[in-house]
Image (tube, rainbow, N blue to C red):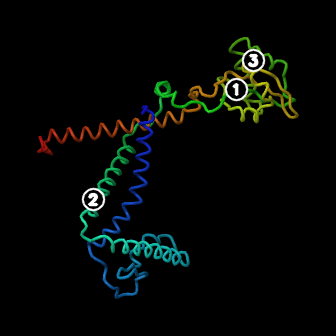
Amino acid sequence: MSEVQCILHFRFFRMAQSRFLWFVFPMLLLASCSYFGKRSKPTGNDVIARANNEYLYLSDVSSALRGLHGQDSIDAIKTYAQTWVRKKLLLQKAQENISDDDVAIARKIEEYREALILFEYEKALIDQKLDTAMRATELNTWYEKVKNDFPLEEDYFKIVFIKLPKDAPDLKEVKKWITKPKDEEELQKLEGYCRDMALSYVLGNGVWFNKEMALKSFPFNEYEISSLVYSAAFKEYKTDDALWFVKIVTKAAKGEASPLELVRDKIARIIIEKRKMLLLEKTYSKIFEDGKESKSFEIYVQ
């Protein structure tokens, strides 16, 4: 298993752990209530539901009614009561087939309780101490380590372009800046002109497009793409409403490693998950070493 697969497996495990604990533990906790006795038959008028010999009281649902009034409050009580009855009947049926003094049930409840406590502790630890800042050098380093785990599923093209109104001023001069800029000053003039006049534009390093999006976004056709890749120069296009200047800077072919720009978010998530793993490992190791130093535990098996 590659390092990235290991990290993503850790992330998936924590997500699954979270969902499992929040679904299973409350069910087991409710089931365990029978070990501590049942509420007696009501004597007042605040009871709102019964499931065999168990009762639900208005005071039990008061927290769920905050901010609700009138019919909304009544509807909420009905919904809560129906859910409560269904769950109680299900648990009661299950308990008919499982002994109340079944040691395995009590052990599982304790295991889930411990798992939930540890999960909440890890979550709080990560929220408080995890460094989430992304540094370019770290992104580049990790990208080089794992880029082969992200092969392209199709061709991509890095494109720079300028889309101008057909009646844009000073086009003769601007075309020189676009096609044959003399120096950095002319490039800055072009940037300022595009900022003021262009309908849309991307200069500098360009932006990645797959073939489908490139054909939808720009006025060239599929047969022109290859020639644009190899020309490495701006090509001018005229449409009904605009004047285009388009250049394909480079191509990344299907099967090659994805460019960093296309997988930056994935790499960032990998870095974060790795940091989580290291933070938890470091914290738990310190807790163990502190316990050893303070003689808080003993292991009697040699």
Quadrant of image for the C terminus = top left
Instruction: Point out residue 95 in the picture as x, y percentages from the top left corner.
Output: 33, 72
The amino acid sitting under disc 1 is Ile
Residue 236 position by quadrant: top right
Q: On screen, 107 above or below 244?
A: below
Measured from the top left, where is residue 38 in percent x and y? 30, 78
Q: Element type at marker 3?
A: loop
| Residue occupying image coordinates x 84% and y 22% | 171
Q: Nearer the viewer, residue 190 or 17?
A: 17
| Marked residue nearer the N-terminal end (1 or 2) | 2
> Label 1 neighbourhood size at 10 Å, few (<14), some (14-19), many (20+)?
many
CA gap, disc 3 and disc 1: 11 Å
| Residue at 24 percent of width and 38 percent of height | 286
Q: What residue type is labelled 2?
A: Glu
* Residue, disc 1: 159
Amino acid at pointer 3: Ala
Describe residue 218's horizontal placement relative to residue 87 as left or right.
right
Question: Which is more toward the observer, 89 or 45?
Answer: 89
Q: Name the residue under label 2.
A: 110
Q: Where in the figure is residue 31, as x and y percent of width and height?
A: 34, 69
On the image, numbered disc 3 is attached to which residue? 233
Q: What element carries label 1?
A: strand
